[in-house]
Image (tube, coloured by chain):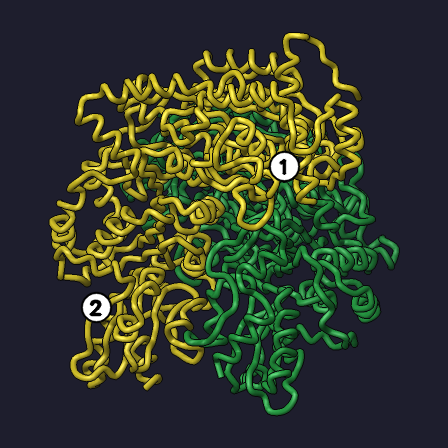
Chain colours: A green, B yellow
Amino acid sequence: MNVQIRNETTIDMRRMAHAIRFLSMDAIVRAADGHPGTPLGGADIATALFARHLKFDAANPTWPDRDRFVHSAGHGSMLLYSLLCLCGYEKIDIEQVKNFRVLGSHTAGHPEYDPEAGIETTTGPLGQGIANAVGMAVAERILNARFGDGIVDHYTYAYTGDGCLMEGIAAEVIALAGHLKLGKLVFLWDDNQMTDDGPTDQAVSEDQCVRFENNGWHVQRVDGHDPEAVAEAIARAKTDDRPSMIACRTLIGFGVPRIQNDRAAHGGKITTEDTDAARANLGWSHAPFELPAEIEAAWREAGARGAHAREAWQERLDALPAQQRAEWDRLMAGDLPQGWTDGLTAKKTQLAQAGDMPGIKASGEMVAALAEVIPELISGAPDLEAATQHKRQLRPFTASDRSGRYIHYGVREHAMGAMMNGMTVHGGIVAMGTTFLVFSDYMRHTLRMAALMRIPGLFVFSHDSIGIGKNGPTHQPVEYLASLRAYPHMWTIRPADSVEMAEAWELGLTHRTGPTSIICSRQPLAVVRQDTGTENRSAKGAYVLAEAEGARQATILATGSEVAVALKAREILAEDGIATAVVSMPCWELFEAQPRAYRDEVLGEAPRVAVEAAVRFGWDRYIGAEGAFVGMDGFGASGDYADVFSHFGITPEAVAEAVRLSL
Amino acid sequence: MNVQIRNETTIDMRRMAHAIRFLSMDAIVRAADGHPGTPLGGADIATALFARHLKFDAANPTWPDRDRFVHSAGHGSMLLYSLLCLCGYEKIDIEQVKNFRVLGSHTAGHPEYDPEAGIETTTGPLGQGIANAVGMAVAERILNARFGDGIVDHYTYAYTGDGCLMEGIAAEVIALAGHLKLGKLVFLWDDNQMTDDGPTDQAVSEDQCVRFENNGWHVQRVDGHDPEAVAEAIARAKTDDRPSMIACRTLIGFGVPRIQNDRAAHGGKITTEDTDAARANLGWSHAPFELPAEIEAAWREAGARGAHAREAWQERLDALPAQQRAEWDRLMAGDLPQGWTDGLTAKKTQLAQAGDMPGIKASGEMVAALAEVIPELISGAPDLEAATQHKRQLRPFTASDRSGRYIHYGVREHAMGAMMNGMTVHGGIVAMGTTFLVFSDYMRHTLRMAALMRIPGLFVFSHDSIGIGKNGPTHQPVEYLASLRAYPHMWTIRPADSVEMAEAWELGLTHRTGPTSIICSRQPLAVVRQDTGTENRSAKGAYVLAEAEGARQATILATGSEVAVALKAREILAEDGIATAVVSMPCWELFEAQPRAYRDEVLGEAPRVAVEAAVRFGWDRYIGAEGAFVGMDGFGASGDYADVFSHFGITPEAVAEAVRLSL
């Protein structure tokens, strides 16, 4: 099929789009790998956005009030890299494009979060990008409510394919975005009716436009190869107070005769024969990686188009009252308010004095206290407000009140996780969310993305063991601590009591290079730490909570609710004259980061027994393959929690017996 | 609000529903725990279904052609237990109801899979139940296509609340069920407009009826407290050739003045004061756990209503030709066809001779071979047909062809996992599904449910490491092997070559008490096993692949693609005169089940080094905390796969060096 140039006025944008196409194809051919379908099919859409609408300044990629562009269909990453290169982002120059998918380049197979390079979030696992975008749009409104239109007033655009829309997470965020009336959010749907497996009608019967409308979105349909039409649609989308979805009808692999409108375009190999054919087909006579001066100039102009807006914004920022300006700078630096830890020691003491308390309640107490001193702390719990108590005095963020700080996610854990990531990469927000530990599975990939992007995020997972009792094994995690500890860059902290809980929150808030999971019990935790000074003992990951009286004959290692079990075992053993130390190990990752001497000292040389109401997997690191472990070797059971602990033999007596046998 | 008895003809069903209400409340009060809202609100809906439509025979709970009833809103489990008790299921008698949520009872907090008790699948994590139901409806059609209407012709009903519909998985299965025109599937939506957090309009703006219609469903709205209306709607649903959703408008906590239509009804405590008030309100004068004879009789009649149908079905079954009957019996017993392993040894040899082959391709070869001898093997890959090659000669299962054996799930991994579980618990199907290992996160909770239910299921996860190369870290699993190995009851098998792949399939198909994950490389695997006899060496989980030449000085442990790395390291070490054994460890779970003597013999007493292109987590069991591990300590990188392996130091040289240092 030949390109139909139907409107002389669009010739420039169409040729600009061709520049994307050829740059992308040349890079993919050079890499001998990559997904050509999206950059070829979506080039006109992307051109309309970048050349006419997107508010950005390629020379200042991290300008805080830039529009955000999320390339959700991450496999088509060359579309994004071509755009960034053409617009003049320094970090994505032509050499980077030539090194597409080469080790060490910024042009990875799928886009990897790098705001300096113009990459707003990591995308690849379908659905994550559009969900991040919804979080960004929430963050924008929250900051707008605090700083006004002069400082925060930008759009969030997400480019999505069919795959993102089929994933379950899409339904969750489309519903929420519509419900929350995120009017500055625009989805550009590359509606090419083709996936890797073939025509979408193999697996899709739904009308996507009806779907979005039913969720409260503003919906338009346009010819995705008519950049003027796309640009006009974006203009209309911007003025509607609902989130907008623009269905852009395209041909996947546009311009390459062999693969156009064919499933082979999705991720199939292309060769120089294909690029030659495309050059002939699209009337493009330039050599690989070269483009005519006027096209290059047009793209550079697009890249610089936002400079004036940025300068004007900077003037408005500079005109802010000093206190507001300082607050803004703090938020953008990702720093916590000065003095935020001032009340922590008092809070620790207060919590210790309050006596036995469920871990999740203690965490809620921390949120209540911290929310008062950290105004950017945003909370949420997918339909578990009562069970998690992390809303407290916070008002909800709603369609009519953007100053709220608690998000009613509905029963949508996956949306919460991905939106938290989106808020975090947007900047200016400390995102926290809580649900039951078993439901972390529903948002699991979002934890991975946070760890991979090395971004913070506070994930509070409650109801952490058989200690939930009667709700039974579906709600009793046993394998989750292991599966969370397996993540690189994430801290998994399981506090033993309210004091460790306070310390966990302090740690989580200071962890800047990865997410933190705080694991909470449902059942009351006895206070095991009476020392509530300024020292954060959990910061070393593990420490001797109760030293042996006399020369250490055994060491019991424990976390969370089982620390109290260990302490009781220690008493039983003391009666037998066995001098036993109890080590609380709230965070393995932090412990592993300690010097060898400290770790050796804590673990000691005496036989070790571990107790944790979870599977053994991972514990052999500390107790050896032959060491005794008191815990679970299968799933739990429904019953009173004390009965369940007894049933599975996780008791002080059993731990004491295991210690005796290990001697 | 008083109950409005608007129609004298419905009095019986309404009173039958009250029996559910009081039995449920009495049990919840006695347990001092549980979720009253659903049994109170949904009693009329359930009564209409069980008393008028559901084809079942309480005296023969596992009758294969029974209608399936899935209680997806599992927290309201007392609704199900009351129904089963009232209908006369032996395993759920009044004592069980009185022991609701007591350790050891069949009446767990959430329903746990037990077909003998009338519990068709484990529900609790919202969304899983309705998704299982879609899988059951697929299984029904597949078996119907093989055995005809006389033997397989039943409906699948799922009772769903708002929570299930908000979860992302709901969107995936609603879309697929509509697309596949599963006309014998009926969702009964308990539309009470209330969740644990409060009114649904806090988080939902979507019109569910429009949503279902847009997905090709037949939709009706009825008064959910009018059992006759519900029964009539079900009758209409049964005759429509689309899947049906019946929106039953109800009041949560119906009948209990304090909590009716209030969020407190969802999971809040109720007391005898509440039950007294309900007794007065609903005109129910019977003591706790007691009911009038005529109501009891009506329920027993409902429970026996299907006996004639079952007998007639049995006659039709008995009239089947012997061969077809034997096939049916085999399928219902969950046995594989006689002689299914006959070709395996030849296949092993053929694969070994084919030389280097990607793991996923070898798995595809196995599916192709096994599909020919196991007609109940149903395959699928969410939009990864080309990359996984697990369709091959199989025709798709579509709305118009129910004899197909490959399901085009679309980009919907979570749907696949839960539908596989649904097919498995339905019976008569060997369910397998494949996707990339990183996307196992999207279906993770379905793996948990399979493990928890101890049901089989073949989950083939491909692209298993940095070996995928250029697609980069979003698609490179590093933490997944650990997180899968942490599951109780699941076998995680990572074959080293095509021969071990054949063995993995043999093992997976014989694993009847839990699911099996088969982990496949994208990159070619060299053949490391030339012995292709009938012995399945992988069955012991780990074995000495290459013994040291002379007294063992070191042992290298490896899995999957790293076994070849280990073998090359062994050669390097041999040149240095270091006698090294290489142990292939495809399945840790199976290895742990071996006798101590075997494990000791395999692992040996020489220093051990492990190599796996994944994180160390879990390996300390075999190498100790001080042992050398060659693998990943963070996420991967985008680049040519050989470059990436070198970059991360997973090379024969690095392994050899680690061995030298360990001596």
Residue extending furthest bottom?
A551
Crowding at dot 1, Cα within 10 Å, few <14 / some 14-19 / many 20+, comes out as some
Nearer mark to the viewer, of 1 and 2: 2
Locate residue B327, reporting x and y percent.
Answer: 22, 30
Q: Secondary structure at mark 1?
A: helix
Q: Which residue is the site of mark 1?
A: A53
Q: Position of residue A6 (x, y in %)?
A: 48, 21
Please state, as top left, top right, bottom left or bottom right, where the N terminus of chain B lies in the image.
top right
Specify the quadrant that holds the C terminus of chain B.
bottom left
Same chain for labels 1 and 2? Say yes or no: no
Three-letter code for the amino acid on which mark 1 is drawn: His
Image quadrant assignment for residue A543: bottom right
**Which image quadrant is residue A51 in?**
top right
Determine whether the residue tagged by mark 2 lies in a helix, strand or loop.
strand
- For image coordinates 46% across by 31% down, the residue present is B133
Task: Identify residue for label 2.
Answer: B545
Q: Report the chain holding disc 2.
A: B
Where residue A525 appears, x then y in whole percent? Answer: 70, 63
- Label of residue B210 in the image: none
The chain that hosts pointer 1 is A
Q: Residue at x 76, y 28 (%)?
A: B278
Q: Amino acid at mark 2?
A: Leu
Give the residue at x 77% y 47%.
A405
Q: In this orientation, which residue lies closer to the viewer: A472 or B496?
A: A472
Q: Are marks 1 and 2 in contact (CB under 8 Å)?
A: no
Q: Is there any visible trace of residue B210 in the rendered image? A: no
